[in-house]
Image (cartoon, rainbow, N blue to C red):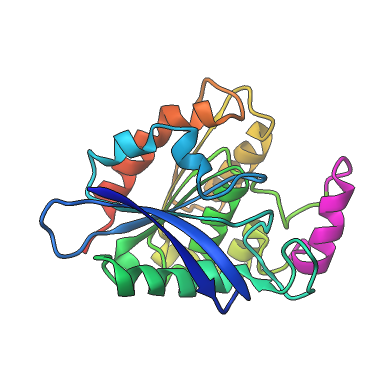
Amino acid sequence: MSIIERTIDSKKLGRANNVKLWIPDTGKKLYPTVYLQHGLGDDEQVPWKRSNLELYAKDYGLIIVTADAKRSWFVNDGRGSESTGGCLWEDYFCYELPSYIEDNFPAAPKAESRGQCGFSMGGYGAMMYTLLHPNRFTAVSAHSGSFTFAHEFREDRPERTEFMKAVAAPGSRYDIFALLDNFPDFTKDVPAIRFDVGDRDHLLEQNRRFHAFLEENCIEHSYIENSGAHQWSYVDSHLRESLKFFSDRLTI
C-alpha cells in the first residue's frame, strides 16, 4: 500500500495540476477508483491532512484519488480569468484525469469501477459529475454537498452570482435539479446515490431540498442527517461509510 503524488501537465486545464492517490497492495491486478473532491478553498492535500483517510483506506480495496480543483466549482470555464478561467474542469475530472489514472495505475477502466465522493463544493461536484455522466461514474457519496450551486443565486454571495451567470446559470447543464428534470428517463439507469449532512450545517436545508426532490421524482437514494457542523471533522466521522458504500457497489 502506498501514497503517490504526481503533477499532471493537463491539456484540458492548460496548466499543471497536482494529484495525490492511495494505491492498495492486495495482489489484485485491478481496483475500483474513488475520486474524492475537496471543498472551496482546499486543495488535493486537505482530505489527507484533515481526516484519517489514509488509515481508513487500508480497510478497503479502493484506489483513492484527490486532485486540486482550485475554486472552480468543477465546471468548464472558458473565460480566461486569472483564477479558474480557461480551464475545462469538467473535461479534466471526467475524462482526462481518469484516463491518466487508468493508464498509469492498476485502475479498472470502466464506469462500474469509478465512484465520485466529495465535501461541500466537492460534494456538489461529485453529485453533478455522476448525474451528468452516468456512463462514466456508477456511484456517488457526498458529505455536506452545496447542491444549490448553479440552481439559484445567493444574495449574500454576489461574487458567486457573477461566476454562476458566466458559466453555471440556473437551468444550465450544471444545475443538478434541472439536470434530472430534463432527463425523465434517467430513473431507468440511476447510479447509486448517497449523501449526508450535519444537523448544524449551514447547508442542511439545501440537502433536505435535494432529498425531497429525489423523493418526489422517485429516484432511489440514501440520505442521512447526523450530528455535526460544516467541518472536515464531520467528514472524517463518516468517511468510512462512504468507503464501505463504494466497496459494496463498485466492481472491476
Q: Residue at x 56, y 56 (%)?
A: 68
Residue 58 location, quadrant? top left
Name the one closer to the observer, 66 or 125: 66
Residue 118 in view in this figure: yes
Foreground residue, 56 or 6? 6
Horizontally, is 239 left or right of 29 in the view?
A: right
In the picture, measured across the screen, residue 154 lies left or right of residue 20, that is right
Q: Position of residue 141 (x, y in %)?
A: 44, 46
Q: Which residues are magenta?
A: 154-171
Q: Is residue 213 left or right of residue 240?
A: right
- Nearest the camera: 121 or 11? 11
Q: Residue at x 28, y 56 (%)?
A: 250
Looking at this view, name the residue that lies furthest to the bottom.
11
Q: Residue 230: percent from the left, percent from the top?
A: 61, 30
> Is residue 157 on the magenta stretch?
yes
How far across and how far down the image is residue 118, in percent?
Answer: 51, 47
Residue drawn at x 55%, y 47% is 38
Is any atom of residue 185 visible in this view?
Answer: no
- Look at the image and tell me in which quarter the C terminus lies: bottom left
Quadrant in which residue 110 is drawn:
bottom left
* Quarter of the view holding residue 212: top right
Count of marks placed on residues? 0
Please provide percent x and percent y for residue 221: 44, 47
Relative to 178, is 58 above or below? above
Q: Residue at coordinates 49% horizontally, 69% vertically from top-left? A: 8
| Residue 55 against residue 123 in the figure, above or below | above
- Residue at the extreme left: 27
